[in-house]
Amino acid sequence: MTTAAPKITPTVVTLLVLTLVSTVVQAADYEAKLAITNHKFEPAELTVPVGQKIKLLVENKDATPEEFESNELNREKIVVGNGTVTIFLGPLEAGRYPFFGDFHQETAQGVLIAK
Ligand SMILES: [Cu+2]
């Protein structure tokens, strides 16, 4: 029989470091949300503040995968069916930044408006 005492194992240290890192990385000034339903973005026009770091949550409510893509924002990220991804943006200058769903471009179109 052994008495279990709390031990600081390499795994524990790794978890602590990862927690710390993700906390730092997730620091953003503004959080925005976008949903994908029936291969369309909701809202299709999303307004965000100029000059702030933005945490954009993209929730795919469809069962099929989609890819959030924007040349203007230089982002491309797959969202699995019924999944959510986090995309960090900015700080942005005032303007319109179109985005689309790469897998359903005929319907999945939207624009981010920074002002
Ligand atoms: Cu793509």
Image (cartoon, rainbow, N blue to C red):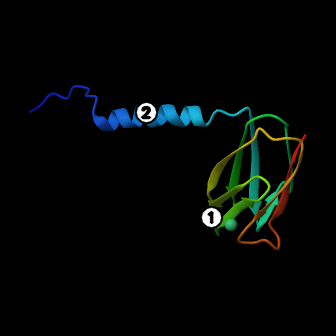
Where, by quadrant of the figure, is residue 107 drawn? bottom right
Residue 7 shown left or right of residue 64 in the figure = left
Which three-letter amino acid code belongs to the residue tagged 2? Val
The x, y position of residue 46, in whole percent, is: 85, 49
Residue 102 sits in which quadrant? bottom right
Q: Quadrant of residue 23?
A: top right
Determine whether the beta carbon of the residue marked 1 sits less than 8 angstroms from the nearest atom of ligand 1: no
Residue occupying the point 72% across, 54% down: 74
Q: Mark 2 points at which residue?
A: 17
**Total count of labels:** 2
Q: Is mark 2 on a helix, strand or loop?
A: helix
Alpha carbon separation for disc pair 2 and 1: 30 Å
The quarter of the picture showing ligand 1: bottom right
Point 12% across, 31% down: residue:
2
Residue 87 in the image: state x and y as whole percent. Answer: 67, 48
Nearer to us in this view, 51 or 17: 51
**Rendered image: mark on residue 11:** none
10 Å neighbourhood of mark 2: few (<14), some, or many (≥20)? Answer: few
Relative placement, left or right, of 25 versus 28 is left
Mark 1 = which residue?
81
56 vs 65: above or below: above
Please tell me whether mark 2 or mark 1 is closer to you in this view: 2
Which badge, 2 or 1, comes first in the chain's sequence? 2
Q: Quadrant of the C terminus?
A: top right
Give the image location of residue 1, x and y in percent.
8, 33
